[in-house]
Structure formats: C-alpha cells, structure tokens
Image (cartoon, rainbow, N blue to C red):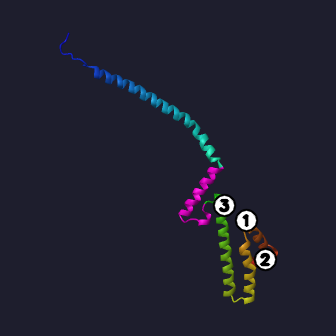
Amino acid sequence: MDNNIHFGDGVLDEAKADVNSRTKGLIKIAIDTVFDYLEGKAKDIPETIEQLRNSPETEQRIAALWSEHLFEEDLVPKGYNGLTDNLLISNFHQEGYLDGLYVGYVLAMMALTDNDAPKDITLAARDYIRPNLIRCHYDEKDEIINQYQNEKYRWIDKT
C-alpha cells in the first residue's frame, strides 16, 4: 500500500465529474423540452395569425391605433381619431370634395365680379351655388357632372 494516499483523495474530483455529467444530461433534457414545446407552438403560429387577421376586434383595434397615430402626428383632425380606414378615407374624400367646391364657388364669384357682371347676376349665381356646397357628397358628384353635360350647358365648353 502506498503511504501517500490520504482519506478523501480523488473523491472531490470524482464528485465534480459525476455532477458535470448529470448536469449535462439535465441541461440536454431541458433544452430538448423547450425546443419541443416551441416547435409545437410554431406550428400554431400561422393559424393564430390568421385568427387575428380575421378578427373584427383586432381589425378595429389596429384601425384605432393607426388613426390615433395619424392624429398624434397632426395628419388628421381630432374628430377622425379612432375611425376605421374606410371612414378615414371617406372623410378625406368628402373634405377634399367640399374644399374643391368652395374654391370653385370663390373662383366663380371672383370671375363674375372681375368681369363686371351685374350684381343681380353675381348674387343669383351665389344663391344657386351656396345650397349645393352644403348638401353635396363626393359620391354624388357624377349627378352634377351629368347635368353639366346636358345639351343646355354644352355650349359653355364648346364656345
């Protein structure tokens, strides 16, 4: 027997090796479990996304967030905050249409005045145009255009 051997020699090294070996096994099991779980969930991701895309609540929430963002960037008025895309677009069309009608009205009044049209003619044109500024909707603009293309008014553009 060798006199250089002491009680406990090598035990700590063997314990460390055993702990390392078992820890590697536990870590491998943990990693396998996590990845198996994620792989199972990854198969559900497209279905979950599809459910979210087809959800009216999600669509409304995204639209509300979008219009809130546009409001915060001062791109839309406060009254437009929270509107869906369709309503935002409709309001933009209507606003632009009414702005265009008003500018057309102003131009007509200026043209009549600058060309020395009699005041009664200018006031008659004003009284004819003003009610149309209020009740017009951009979806109905074809009605006005079709009226203008009638034989009664065609001479204006032909002259």
3 or 32: nearer the eye? Answer: 3
Q: Main secondary structure of the magenta part?
A: helix
Q: In the rendered structure, does residue 59 fall within the stretch colored magenta? A: yes
Kind of residue at disc 1: Asp
Kind of residue at disc 2: Tyr
Q: Residue furthest left?
A: 3
Residue linked to disc 3: 87
Instruction: Indicate which disc, 2 or 3, sits on the residue closer to the N terminus.
Output: 3
Q: Residue at x 65, y 69 (%)?
A: 96
Quadrant in the rendering for residue 9: top left
42 or 10: nearer the eye? Answer: 10
Q: Residue at x 19, y 12 (%)?
A: 2
> SS for tag 3?
helix
Residue 139 numbered tag? 1
Residue 31 numbered tag? none
Q: Position of residue 63 (x, y in %)?
A: 61, 56
Q: Does the CB distance between marks 2 and 3 fall below 8 Å?
A: no
Residue 156 visible in image: yes
Residue 153 vs 73, above or below: the answer is below
Mark 3 crowd level (few <14, some 14–19, many ≥20, 10 Å Cα): few
User: Seen in the image, is 20 located left or right of residue 133?
Assistant: left
Q: Residue at x 62, y 50 (%)?
A: 58
User: Seen in the image, is 43 located left or right of residue 144?
Assistant: left
Quadrant in the rendering for residue 143: bottom right
Q: Residue furthest right?
A: 151
Residue linked to disc 2: 153
Instruction: Indicate which disc, 3 or 1, sits on the residue closer to the N terminus.
Output: 3
